[in-house]
């Protein structure tokens, strides 16, 4: 009973920690980016392609899986059999936990080819968020701390009517 509870707790902790990844979408900002200057350049989308971002491999899944496997394996046999079962269980559990973490954290992403107003073309990959992109769309490429993201260009307001945005 105690082993079952421990296994359930470790598995739950592994799944929760795997879900705590940061978004890489163009409409998502990190706390560190708030109140910091971000430069941007204007461009036009040439091509949009759906791609996959690999999942994370932070060792949390490996460690959690190894712990669960070790506990489960130690219940096999007595004496040395329990030790061997724990070791084999830990190895198999670690491999399974690592694969589970990578699979649970994989994300769909956009590969956006953008022609900048300067004539230069670039490709930026970002997680799919709320923003939609199609060839011909006017966009802004935002750059901060060596990272770039694409966001739709804001429409230029008509002549000032005194209305607040």
Image (tube, rainbow, N blue to C red):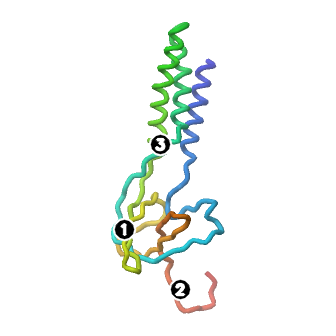
Which numbered disc, 3 or 1, marks the residue that appears first in the sequence?
3
Residue positioned 63% across, 60% down in the render: 31
Q: Is residue 127 above or below residue 82?
A: below
In the image, 131 versus 64, the foreground residue is 64
- Quarter holding residue 163: bottom right
Badge 1 marks a residue whose secondary structure is strand
Q: Residue furthest top?
A: 78
Residue 44 position within the rendered picture, expressed as x and y whole percent measured from the top left: 39, 75
Q: Which dot marks residue 104?
A: 3
Residue 110 position within the rendered picture, expressed as x and y whole percent measured from the top left: 40, 60
Residue under numbered circle 2: 157
Q: CA distance from mark 2 to mark 1?
A: 27 Å
Residue positioned 38% across, 65% down in the render: 123
Q: Quadrant of the N terminus?
A: top right
Residue under numbered circle 1: 113
Badge 3 marks a residue whose secondary structure is helix
Q: Residues within 10 Å of mark 3 (few under 14, many from 20)?
A: some
Q: Is residue 29 above or below residue 71?
A: below
Q: Nearer the viewer, mark 2 or mark 3?
A: 3
């Amino acid at each position: 009973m105690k082993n079952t509870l421990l296994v359930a707790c470790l598995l739950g902790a592994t799944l929760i920690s795997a879900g705590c990844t940061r978004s890489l979408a163009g409409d998502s900002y990190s706390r560190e980016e708030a109140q910091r200057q971000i430069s941007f350049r204007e461009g036009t989308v040439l091509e949009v392609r759906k791609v996959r971002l690999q999942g994370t491999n932070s060792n949390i899944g490996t460690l959690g899986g190894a712990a669960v496997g070790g506990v489960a394996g130690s219940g096999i046999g007595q004496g040395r059999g329990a030790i061997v079962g724990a070791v084999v269980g830990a190895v198999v559990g670690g491999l399974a936990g690592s694969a589970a973490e990578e699979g649970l954290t994989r994300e769909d992403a956009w590969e956006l080819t953008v022609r900048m107003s300067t004539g230069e073309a670039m490709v930026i990959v970002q997680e799919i968020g709320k923003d939609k992109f199609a060839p011909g769309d006017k966009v802004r490429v935002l750059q901060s701390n060596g990272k770039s993201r694409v966001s739709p260009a804001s429409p230029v307001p008509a002549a000032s009517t005194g209305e607040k945005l």
